[in-house]
Image (cartoon, helix red, strand yellow):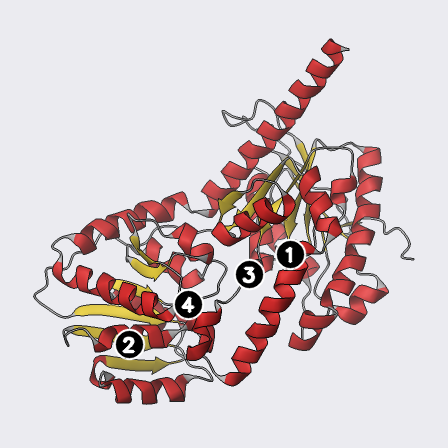
Amino acid sequence: MTAPIQPVPVMSDVAEMRRTEPRPPCDAAPRRLRVLVCAFAVSPIGGSEPGLGWNVVSRLARWHDVTVLCSPGMPGERDFRREIADQLRAEPIPGLTFHFVPPPLLSRMLQRETLMRRRTVYYLGYRSWHRAALAAARSLHAKAPFDLVHQLNITGYREPGDLWRLPIPFVWGPIDGASDLGWSFFSIMGWGERLFYATRNVTNALQKRAPLRARRAAHRASHIWAIGGTNTEMVRRHWDREAESVIESGAKPVTGSARSFDGTRPLRLVWNGLHIGRKALPILFHALRDLDGGHEVVVLGEGPATRSWKRMAERLGIADRVRWTGFIPHAEAMAELERADALVHTSLLEGTPAVVLEALTRGIPVICHDGCGMGVAVTERSGIKVPLRDPETSIAGFREAIDRLAHEAELVERLSGGALARARALSWDAMSERIARRYTDVVEQRQAFVERTIGFG
């Protein structure tokens, strides 16, 4: 059994970093709360899970005093401790404290980032880290009680952590992982991916129903955030709780301006992603086959499916409308995006793709499936969403959306303005403020309940 782990400060000469000057609370926060956040992965220079951890906790300190329990790094790979310390030396954040929980032996053995480990034993190691995190949390809470605890990441619904066991309000999310890849879409993927996603679908169906700890944590939670409709539906159906639909990423500051298209030149479309089956570029190709030739398509990226997709474009007779860039530097990719009238994002299974948020910040309308995180990020005012049902519905939907942009006057300009507005609403700052306000609501509701209970007694 893992021995209790003592919290480790972010820098050896500074045990805690707290706000040195009082800050005026926001309208919804009459007082700064003491909040404990469990975020296994946090890094100011990372993307994905580490980026989510940093971008949220670093901003929450504007409203509350935040203590973060996190790992010092990914076993054998990343050093989060050093990355955080370097950032805080350059830009101190008052009100933010880090306590690093060293990974126990089982975590060090099983959490090395390989595909096979992640799909088999990774969560066993992750579970052992959470037991150590609970011991650290109890020690911290005994010394200076917290008002609320938040299980932030890793976002997978299968592991809720253990901090819901503390005797204070608990919130959880955003959670992800419940989405399956629709069986009807298997026909557009290779056999290897078909086998992988078939196994994933079956396993996922069992895991949504099985984890008792996840269900207990959900019932203990005062509030749950979930990524998109499938995850919120899973919370409702299998855990009998309600969840707020969100995305797990934030948009960068707006850099673009509203653009227009008058139909006197070809419509410029861009597609960006790794060339693998679930990204579903063939949907766009089949949609283009039945449209006139007045469209220019730029395909960014490469991958295992590149060769077969190029052959498909030849067979469908659209190769002269498609320009392939291969892997290019990010700045060049963003320059291609800047020249586009719309981003076409055909992916079938995602969280919230960075390319979608990047398009919105540049005022570029998005055509995508109405599912996963992109279904939340993109609204009817910022793009056109296609039902995620089957290949035939998708092809028809993308074809109709492209045709509308090409022939409806002022549609590109209207959606472009909506994209810029949506990017502002989805910024990291806006997301963190909503979370901070929710903390206050939860604590105030708990206090009101206690007061009513005492008064009744």
Amino acid type, callout 4: Ser
The nearer-to-camera label among 3 and 1 is 1
Residue 395, percent from left and from top: 30, 69
Whether residue 340 is visible to the viewer of this picture, yes or no, is yes
- For marks 1 and 2, give the CA distance: 34 Å
Please determine whether, in this image, residue 216 is positioned above or below residue 359: above
Question: Residue 268: which quarter of the image?
Answer: bottom left
Q: Can you identify the residue that label 2 sits on?
A: 286
The nearer-to-camera label among 4 and 1 is 1
Circle 1/circle 2 CB separation < 8 Å = no
Residue 310, percent from left and from top: 33, 87
Nearest the camera: 68 or 239?
A: 239
- For marks 3 and 2, give the CA distance: 31 Å
On residue 347, which mark appears?
4
In the image, 55: left or right of 417?
right
Q: Can you identify the residue that label 1 sits on?
A: 208
Residue at 78% x, 33% y is 167
Nearest the camera: 133 or 233?
A: 233
Q: Can you identify the residue that label 3 sits on?
A: 48
The nearer-to-camera label among 3 and 2 is 2
In the image, 247: left or right of 333?
right
Residue at 32% x, 76% y is 299
Q: Quadrant of the N terminus?
A: bottom right
Amino acid type, callout 1: Lys
Residue 56, percent from left and from top: 56, 47
**Earlier-in-chain disc, 3 versus 1:** 3
Amino acid type, callout 3: Ser
Circle 3/circle 2 CB separation < 8 Å = no
Q: Say which element carries label 2.
A: helix
Residue at 48% x, 47% y is 428
On residue 227, which mark appears?
none
